[in-house]
Amino acid sequence: MTPQSVETGDEPLSKSRLRLWLKLLKASNLIEDQIRRRLRDQYQSTLPRFDVMSALSRSPEGLKMSQISEMLRVSNGNVTGIVDRLTDEGLALRVAVPGDRRASLVRLTPKGQAAFAEHAAAHESWIDDMLDGLNADDVEGMIRRLDYLNETLEDKE
Amino acid sequence: MTPQSVETGDEPLSKSRLRLWLKLLKASNLIEDQIRRRLRDQYQSTLPRFDVMSALSRSPEGLKMSQISEMLRVSNGNVTGIVDRLTDEGLALRVAVPGDRRASLVRLTPKGQAAFAEHAAAHESWIDDMLDGLNADDVEGMIRRLDYLNETLEDKE
DNA sequence: CATGGAAAGTTTAGGCTTGAAGTAAAAATC
DNA sequence: GATTTTTACTTCAAGCCTAAACTTTCCATG
């Protein structure tokens, strides 16, 4: 056995980890592509818009631009463009923050709330459909490992 | 119990599946962002370039544009741009296909082969490092479930 | 061999994404 | 109170990505 390499069967663990990553990425892309396609076809929307609206829907009092970009882990300039487009379509709006003329609070409009409620319900059923091959044990086993993985990944940042 | 809803503990399975998807997406994004950042910082490259070069490196005789876009599941026009940029940098080149003036074979140049070999080695060690919290059992368990999930997802396309 | 359709690629418009540069306002420091 | 630094956000350039339109070439059918 090669020193320092832990083996599983006949394959070094590092190779298995690489294979795991490629399969994880593949699953993620397959699911994400489906969601993007359906959001586009059925609602003339996109995943980034969905993500921003989802964050806003959880904070009816509104969110600052910087809060959104932190929650979604995307750049500030990115959020500017997405909120601009949501605003153009009457789904969101910027409200001035009294006492701080630099910032503004972004909120969903009633129209935005209604649209997101519809999108979110569809989204949940799409996921349920795409993952219906996994039973409760599978789901639990994967969640447990992904939780641990995500913790270690965040620690490393 | 609600009719038609399979429960695990006190949560409907559809909710668990949604949570699983969000965690899968999070892990995928955390890892992908790290890879993008390192490819950029250490090699002035990008993940799409890496993916194209990876496909090309496995086919020294070259690949047609349409083969690349099919393998990577991206659009034709997308590949055009990426190969253009690789070509501009002397990492890839287009070779005429005798007997078909529409198509061309894309190949890595020697410079491209050398660059990719370096990037691929680094890439593998980054993954090994990021996933080092998972032991052989974890890796095997996740691969098994992801294999199954990917199969069902591809069947649904 | 003419012609109509299929195939291979490119181009284009529009949106997403980043890092970097820029603007303005607030806060801290002197 | 003036100056410096930080904070909040926008703008910009460049790359990525898609669907759709387009060009060129190939091929099948009459």
Image (spheres, coloured by chain):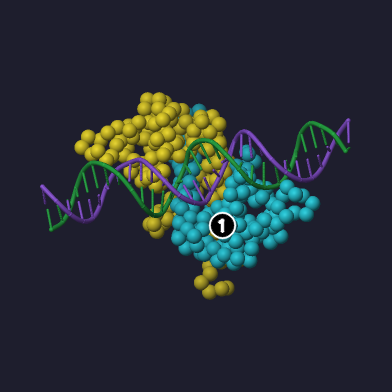
Chain colours: A yellow, B cyan, C green, D purple
User: How many discs appear?
Assistant: 1
Residue B19: image quadrant is: top left
Q: Is residue A132 above or below residue B38?
A: above
Q: Residue at x 43, y 29 (%)?
A: A89
Q: Residue at x 57, y 54 (%)?
A: B85
Front one among A58 and A50: A50
Q: Position of residue B6 (x, y in %)?
A: 51, 35
**Left or right of D6 in this view: C2:** right
- Under mark 1, the amino acid is Phe
Q: Is residue C18 above or below residue B107?
A: above
Residue B138 shows up from this direction? no
Front one among B83 and B69: B83
Q: Chain of mark 1?
A: B
Q: Position of residue A49 (x, y in %)?
A: 44, 36
Front one among A121 and B34: B34
Q: Position of residue A61 (x, y in %)?
A: 30, 33
Q: Is residue B39 above or below residue B100?
A: below
**Callout 1: SS:** helix
**Left or right of D1 in this view: A115:** right
Residue A66 shows up from this direction? yes
Q: Which residue is mark 1?
A: B50
Front one among B31 and B75: B75
Q: Residue at x 64, y 61 (%)?
A: B108
The quadrant of the picture occupied by the C terminus of chain B is top right
Q: Residue at x 50, y 62 (%)?
A: B43
Residue A62: image quadrant is: top left
